[in-house]
Amino acid sequence: MKEVMAIIRQNKVNQTKEALVKDGYPAFTCLKVLGRGKKTIDLSIVQDIVDAGEMPISPIGESLTESSRLIPKRFFTLIVEDEDVAKVVSIIIDNNQTGNPGDGKIFVIPIEESIRVRSGEKNADAF
């Protein structure tokens, strides 16, 4: 068993959920998270938007700094059999890849054991 964890854009949640369910992976957890990648924010672009009058300064001034701004994202996690990992990863990529920075990250880690609290069933029987 493996845990597939994905951090994706907020606007891709419904599309990702629908694709996972459609392809037979209805059991997952989705959380609201904040984070950031390695890329820094180019404040000159933001200043151009403000200067053009397209956005008021107050929200930017209060929440945007080059070194520390956290971006709202969504965190998906699901447990799958080893042979399903490639398919699940492909579903997530197909539904989230735009080619732009911030598309997300996927992590795959081994699961040693799973136990259903209600019945005590273990491993594959537990999910």
Image: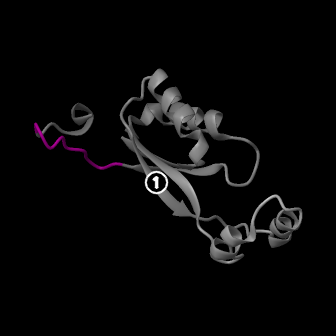
Question: Magenta span has 114?
Answer: yes
Q: Quadrant of residue 42?
A: bottom right
Left or right, residue 57 beside residue 51: left
Q: Quadrant of residue 93?
A: top right
The chosen color scheme is one colour
The vertical placement of 116 against 40, above or below, is above
Pick the quarter of the image with the N terminus: top left
The amino acid on which the numbered mark 1 sits, given as a three-letter code, is Lys
Q: Looking at the image, which residue is at 69% across and 40% down?
A: 97
Residue 66 at what x, y percent from top left?
Answer: 72, 75
Can residue 86 be seen?
no
- Give the residues in magenta: 111-119
Can residue 110 be seen?
yes
Residue 24 at what x, y percent from top left?
Answer: 43, 23
Closest to the observer, 14 or 16:
14
The vertical placement of 35 against 118, above or below, is below
Q: Looking at the image, which residue is at 64% across and 33% down?
A: 94
Question: Magenta span has 9?
Answer: no
The vertical placement of 46 against 3, above or below, is below
Q: Looking at the image, which residue is at 53% across and 34% down?
A: 14
Closest to the observer, 92 or 123:
92
In the orientation shown, which residue stands out farthest toward the left? 119
Q: Looking at the image, which residue is at 56% across and 32% down?
A: 15
Residue 25 at what x, y percent from top left?
Answer: 42, 29
- Residue bearing mark 1: 32
Left or right, residue 43 beside residue 63: right
Q: Which type of secondary structure does the marked residue at label 1 adopt?
A: strand
